[in-house]
Amino acid sequence: MDLNIRIGGEAGQGLVSTGEMLTGSLSDTGLHVFTGKSYMSRIRGGLNWFDIRISDSELFALKKEADVTVALSMEAMEILGEYASPDGIIIYNGNGEDKKQTLYLNFDEIAKEVSGSVIMANSVAAGAIFALLGYSPDSLFAYFKKEFRKKGEDIVRKNLKCASRGYSEANRRSLKIESPVSKNASGEYSSGASAIALSAAVAGIKLVSAYPMTPGTATFAGLAALSDKYGIVVEQAEDEIAAVNMICGAAYAGVPAMTTTSGGGFALMCEGLSLAGMMELPILIVIAQRPGPATGLPTRTGQEDLKFAINAGHGEFVRAVFAPGTIQQCYDLTRKAIETAHEFQGPVIILTDQYLQDIQKNIGRLNEEYNPVNRHIVENADENYKRYMPSPDGISPRAIPGGKSLVICDSDEHGADGHLAEDLEIRNEMQRKRMSKMNVLKSQLVQPEYYGEADAEQVFICWGSTYGPCREVVDSINAAGRKTALLHYSQVWPLDILQVSRLLEKKTRLIVVEGNYSGQFLSLLREHGFAGECDLITRYDGLPFTSEFIIGELEK
């Protein structure tokens, strides 16, 4: 079984710290834990919430309904109460008489009474939640001792007293809820953003230059945290134009480099992206999507930049675009992206989004051992070296400044030696050379993952972060006796539609699921020759897909 805990309140009320306390201590009990957060673009006030889903089996997505709702404010009580499950419990941070499924417990008053300050109200709340779930508080107490020991024994003692009081106050009430039993889930707790950052560091990224833009900042911050350990130069540029040009310069010099941004920041990077295409520079751009256009919803999620990422930049040039669907894929595909950029000598994009950036779950331990990718650099280039020497696959030997050879790069059209050229025959030769590298990318595509029944009656087609919700839908429908599967794309450019075409031949019902209004991935399939019937489920309100949402749309 699984259970969803939702903590809601205003920004500044400590709901994230409460969530982190519960997440750390619940995962230490051996449960599978999956968390996510929804927050407004403000420092104080508003309505934010933190979801903690726990289970005795692996989890892949968030849920719409909450089994335990912790309302830190009246607004949270009124709004989030509507999403409480029929048998769920609501805990309100205030005074009142307990009702059938509502418990009134004033965390602030208890914290002030026990510790002398309301700042430890979140510890009271954590203790109360442990009591309602029927779990021993031992793992919660152990969490406090481990996490707060640097703050001194007095802080540890006060937090323990607050949590203990919250536990005892809730424990003496009649409200309880059935909870999953631990099955010793293994692994470490990680987010999509931290997995990308770690993978990039391990793969040998030595410069990250970025201008902070939500939700891409999480990866930027993750790399900054790893910079000392892995020897990474972290530069907060004055804007996105500077950031992308810095990594282009670094790539020319042989330094593995990347930037992080969101859709609006990527719009400013398009000229630099085109520069990397012309100069054949291996750069990585991580785009964490959010709803647009313009500023849009800065702290929400979406999949609106698919076609933008594939087509951005003036002129024609080759690029690869990856769209991981899980935290593990964030780690694996980041390395793949860096390897690809250096092998074919060009720009590579990773498309993630606010949801995938911020979700956290316990997964297998990610490898932290430094293992830089092959930069494919020629070490012995002589005085006759030509940077853009034509080759059968379009990939020229790559040397970097500092050796015997002169390495010339130019944003203008150029000849094999890198010098500016306006000869039209040279132009044709160079453009054919650059574009022929698409064949290299196509030969190394990450194939879409098929999950579910081999002879499925219906198949969900998805890309990027919709993998988890779609997988849970497939499991639910298969359990009900209808054969279902999913086909998930984690590389969206170049695109291979062979498996989709085979499903069409079987007369399988196809349903594309994506987080945008117009159905961009379905449109991309059409552009590549897919002409069959296909249903489309979209979401564009800024919230992530859940299995309940998809099933609800499927039933319409």
Image: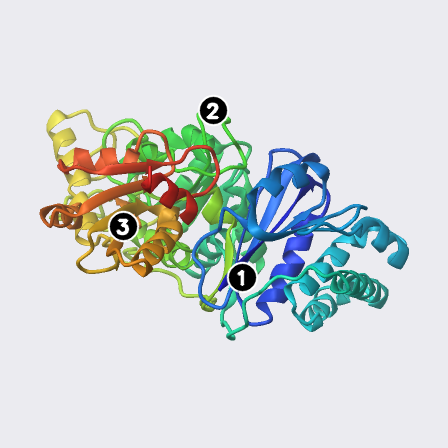
Classify mark 3: helix, strand or loop.
Answer: loop
Classify mark 2: helix, strand or loop.
Answer: loop
Mark 2 is on which residue type?
Ala
Q: Is residue 35 above or below residue 281?
A: below
Q: Which residue is mark 1?
A: 54
Corner quadrant of residue 381:
bottom left
Tell me, yes or no, whether the two marked residues, 2 and 3, touch with CB atoms within 8 Å. no
Q: Which mark is residue 308?
A: none
Identify the residue at image location x=46%, y=48%.
356
Q: CA distance from mark 1 to mark 3?
A: 50 Å
First in sequence, mark 1 or 3: give its number: 1
Q: CA distance from mark 2 to mark 3?
A: 39 Å
**Dot 3 crowding, Cα within 10 Å, few <14, some 14–19, many 20+:** many
Q: Which residue is mark 3?
A: 398
Q: Is residue 235 above or below residue 315?
A: below
Q: Which residue is mark 2?
A: 294
The label nearer to you, 1 versus 3, is: 1
Mark 3 is on which residue type?
Arg
First in sequence, mark 2 or 1: give its number: 1
First in sequence, mark 2 or 3: give its number: 2
Residue 401 in sight in this render: no
Tell me, yes or no, whether the two marked residues, 2 and 1, touch with CB atoms within 8 Å. no
Q: CA distance from mark 2 to mark 1?
A: 37 Å
